[in-house]
Structure formats: structure tokens, C-alpha cells
Image (cartoon, helix red, strand yellow):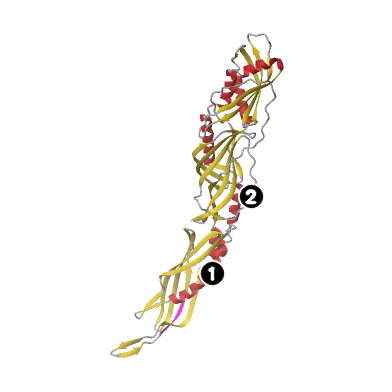
Amino acid sequence: MTVFTALALAGCKKDAPTGPPPRANDAIEVPPQSSTIAVPVTADLSALSAALESEVPRTLWTIDRQDETCVASERVKVAFVKLKTPKIKCDIAGTVTRGRMTFAGRGQRIVVTMPLHAEVRAQDIAGILKQETATGDAIVRAVVDISPDDNWNPRGTVDIEYDWTDAPHVDFLGQRIEFTSEADEKLKGVVARLERTLPRELAKVELRREVERLWRQAFTSLQLNERDPPVWMRITPERLQYGGFTLDGRKLELKLGMTARTETFVGDRPPDPKPAALPPLQRLEEQAGKLVFFIPVVADYAQLEPVIAEALAKRSARPFAVPGIGPVDAKFGKVEAYGTTENRVAVGVTFTATPRDHDVGSARGTVWLTGKPVNAENSRRVGFENLSITGDTDRAGADLLLDLANSPGFAQTIAVALVQNFEGDYDELLGKIARAIDNKREGDLLIRAQIEDIETGRLRAAGQGLYLPVRGTGSASIMLSPN
């Protein structure tokens, strides 16, 4: 498979025999491009829930107070005479219990809700009534503002509020006896305990460990296509940003955006980038998952050699028409391709040429075709400039080999094989990449991405390979997903 197309070859010139063109050793320079990839990281709050359940007992407090004033003395006017009613004494006893705590996410907050149920008994009321029982219910809400600190450790500030949905009371002799003040006094201790416990237990959530594990594993090279041709994408994370969280049951999911550089290679697997230390937390300033990627589609020259050899082998079934010589049979052997100076491609072909109508014998040697591939931006039609053919042959057969190499059949065969109109090949390559990264696993790392728009740049031949820059937009997410 090739990675570019050809216009018609023209202007080939026959030079004096010479050795192979010099090899270029320049590397491909990829312009910096960054993307903010969505990186959801989950933390299990089951331990926090269990800690609160353990820290806060089911029975929050008991009340056992003797000879309390249930109803205070009041002055009432009867027949123009003011009388003072007696105090009503009683003994107060009871318990307040809590129900199951629940968690919910609300914006950047966690809301812990704890229902309370009070059962208070007024005993030996004024020495008349033996006992009256009052029940009441309250809701305690702990609102936790949570966010990781600069070292990715979770921190939270707590604001606790409560209200009685049904205050504990009894009715006696037309009087309402409430026990809210007694319950409120005890409730202050529970609030204080929650204020201490919540931040402490929240700090135990191993958030940094999960973030660090994802960050470290994201420095990787993923295989997008196994063969025809092999395609790899290398990910190099640069920054990690925090953009809030959502809560689903006991699962806390942080919304993170990872700024990363992505590169795509055609050929052998590139080395994985060396992991850097987890950077300090930064605030997310744009929507996570917005992918702007720059793909340097690099064709290893070794991938081109069998393509050219196959095309020449098929063409050798017919003789080449060489001006002034007539039909010439050719048998092709080794094909070598590499980058040479001035951003040109060099293709060396070793072959034997035998004229049919001239008894001059056969000539064997290597002919070199060099040229600079050119194309317009957003065009995948590519041609050659400054095309040149030189030879490395025995002197007796030099002219014959060079004449054959300059014949239209030879040049066009290499051109079609090397730079054919590759609309189908290009679309197939991007289609394979798009399908591959739609749901790609690498160990515990799961990558999902969609390519939405593509722009192509100008082709360049370098020592490292033949390089077509591709810029695109889409969406992507990376997450840890154990097998």
C-alpha cells in the first residue's frame, strides 16, 4: 500500500552513470498540536459510607431527666382577677435514632442525608398522668464542597443543616409540650462529629492513586491496524485538568481533561514515550473531550519496496519499447527506496535488460530514479518535480539500461506503483484508524474516539520516511477499565 498519488511523469533526463544517491538522515518535524481528551476517573465512596455508618451510631442519644418543667407557670385573668397557674412537672425520657445515610451529587457538592427519628416520653406528669409519648422526625443534611487539592488528594468543607419535619411534642390540658430544645442540644454533638469525620474520611479516598495510574499508562503506543499497513498512534500526555465530578451511587467520577500530543505512524511500532511525573492539578478551562489532533502519516520506505517490485514484476511480462533499440525484455530483482537530499525520494532498481532485435547481449545493473513529491493542501493527488534517472551499471550496458529506464513504460510503472492516485488507499487507512480508536483497549486503558473532520497538508520526503501531515477534529476519551 502506498500513501500518495501520481500525476504523469515527464522531463526525465539521462545522466552519466553514477553511484547511489546520498541518503538523508533528517527526522520528520511534527508541529506541536494539543488536544484536551476527556479522562473520567472514578473513586469508590463505599469506604466513606462505611466509615460514617461506623462513626455515627444508630442511637444518637438518650434523654433521662427528672422533675423537669413541662409547662411553665402563666398568669391568667379570671373574673377580673389575675391568677398564676402552677408549673407542670414531669420526667422526660427518650431516644433519638438515625436511619440509613444516603449520598447524592449536586453540582460540585456531595449531599449526605441522615434521617432522624425521636421518641420522647413525658412520665408522671403533674402526678396525674402516668405517661405521654411524643414522636418526631428530622432530616440532617451535610453539604460537602469537594475538590482535589494541587496534589490530587480530595478535600472537602462541610456545611451541616437540619430541620424538624415533625417536632417531638405532646398535648396536655390544652397545652403543647415540645421537646425540640432537648433534641437540639443533643443534635449539636452529632453535627460536630460529622464535621470532623467527613473531611477526614474523604481524605482517605485513594483518588491520587487512580489518577496517577491512568496518567502513567496513558504514555503509550496503541496499534490501530495490524497489517496492510501496520498503523500506530502514540500518546504523550502533557497536562491534566479538573472540571468537577458526578456521583452515581457510591461511585464518584471526576471529570478530567488531559492535554496530550498524539502522533500516528505507519510501519514499525514507535517507542512508547517516557512517562513524566503527575503534574499539579489545573482547572479545566474548556470542554473535555474536544479532540484536535495532528497525525503525521509516515510511510516507512521499506513498505514501498515490495509494492514497486510487484508492479515491475507484472510489467516485465511485456517487453519495453526503447526508442532506437526496439523491444527489450527485462527481469527485475532488488528494489531499494529511501529519502535523499532536498526532500526527494530515491528508488533503486536492479535488473537485467535483453534487446530482442539486437545481438548485443544482456546488460545488468542498478538504475536510480529520484524526484521530489509535491501536492497541494487538502489534495491527495501527488506528482514529482525535478525527476532524474541515473545508473550504477557496467560500462558496456550503461546506455541500454539508462535508455530502458527512460522509456515511458519503465518510468510510468514505478510512478503508478509509487505515487498512484491513492484516494481509496487514504480513505481506507483513515477508516481503519477511525474504527480502531472507536473502542481500543491497551491493558487497563480504554480509548474511545471519533474522527469528524480531516485536512491534509503537503507531502514531504525525509530520511525517516515519507510524511503526509493530517490535521483533524473529533472527540476522544481515555479511561481505566480493568479486564
**Disc 1: which residue:** 193
**421 and 161: which is toward the camera:** 421
N-terminal label among 1 and 2: 1
**201 and 138: which is toward the camera:** 201
- Circle 1: element type: helix
Label placed on residue 303: none
Tag 1: Cα neighbours inside 10 Å, few (<14), some, or many (≥20)? some
Residue 204: give x, y in percent of width and height: 59, 60
Type of amino acid at the residue the image marks with label 1: Arg
Q: Quadrant of residue 319?
A: top right
Q: Is residue 277 above or below residue 64?
A: above
Tag 2: Cα neighbours inside 10 Å, few (<14), some, or many (≥20)? few
Q: Is residue 262 above or below residue 196?
A: above
How many callouts does the rendering have? 2
**223 and 59: which is toward the camera:** 223
Q: Nearer the viewer, mark 1 or mark 2?
A: 2
Type of amino acid at the residue the image marks with label 2: Ala
Q: Is residue 98 above or below residue 17?
A: below
Quadrant of the rendering where the N terminus is positioned: top right
Q: Residue at x 52, y 29 (%)?
A: 381
Q: Residue at x 44, y 72 (%)?
A: 119
**Disc 2: which residue:** 276
Q: Seen in the image, is 369 located left or right of residue 430?
A: right
- Circle 2: element type: loop
Residue 252: give x, y in percent of width and height: 52, 56
Residue 101 is covered by the magenta coloring: no
Residue 235: give x, y in percent of width and height: 59, 44
Determine contact: label 1, label 2, CB under 8 Å.
no
- Give the extent of the magenta segment: 88-93
Q: Is residue 256 above or below residue 202?
A: above
Looking at this view, name the residue that lies furthest to the bottom.
81
Q: What secondary structure predominates along the stretch shown in magenta?
A: strand
